Amino acid sequence: MENLKKTIIKIIAKELDVPQGSIKDDTSIQEDLGADSLDFINIVMAIENNFNIEIDEDMLMEFNTVTNIVDALATVLEPERI
């Protein structure tokens, strides 16, 4: 899961143009990093493209922090991709 977390942090950092070091497990994407709805959509699309998956709307409700994203993706990704 550590690789998955690193990948998610890289994606968020790239999409929001913030240093990776500023993103912690419990960092709120919207509150702490100031992501707006368009930023959020770009992050989700980047995650979908990176993992070649489609994220359903129910899962999106859990995408608040890095930990929430990793936990949600762990339920849909094959074990070797985590």
Image (cartoon, rainbow, N blue to C red):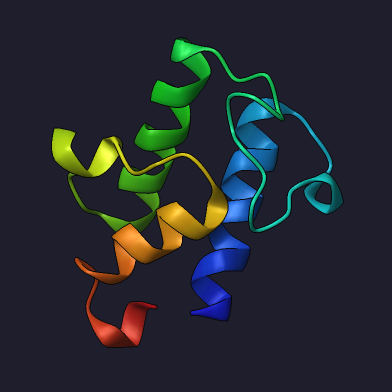
Horizontally, residue 62 falls left or right of residue 64, namely left
Q: Position of residue 37 (x, y in %)?
A: 45, 13
Left of 61 or right of it: where is 22? right
Q: Is residue 53 above or below residue 35?
A: below
Tell me: 11 left or right of 27. Answer: left
Please give left or right for residue 38 compared with residue 60 in the image. right
Let me know if residue 3 appears in the view. yes
Identified at 29% across, 35% down, the residue is 61
Q: Is residue 56 visible?
A: no
- Image coordinates for residue 14, horizontal then vertical, percent: 67, 37
**Residue 22, relative to residue 36: is it above or below?**
below
Image coordinates of residue 7 in percent, x first then y, are: 56, 61
Report the quarter where the C terminus lies: bottom left
Q: Which residue is found at the position 54% from the left and 46% from the top?
A: 65
Identify the residue at image location x=84%, y=42%.
Answer: 19
Percent position of residue 5, x then y: 56, 66
User: Front-most of 32 and 44?
Assistant: 32
Q: Nearer the viewer, residue 3 or 28?
A: 28
Task: Tell me the residue at 47%/39% (across/down).
Answer: 64
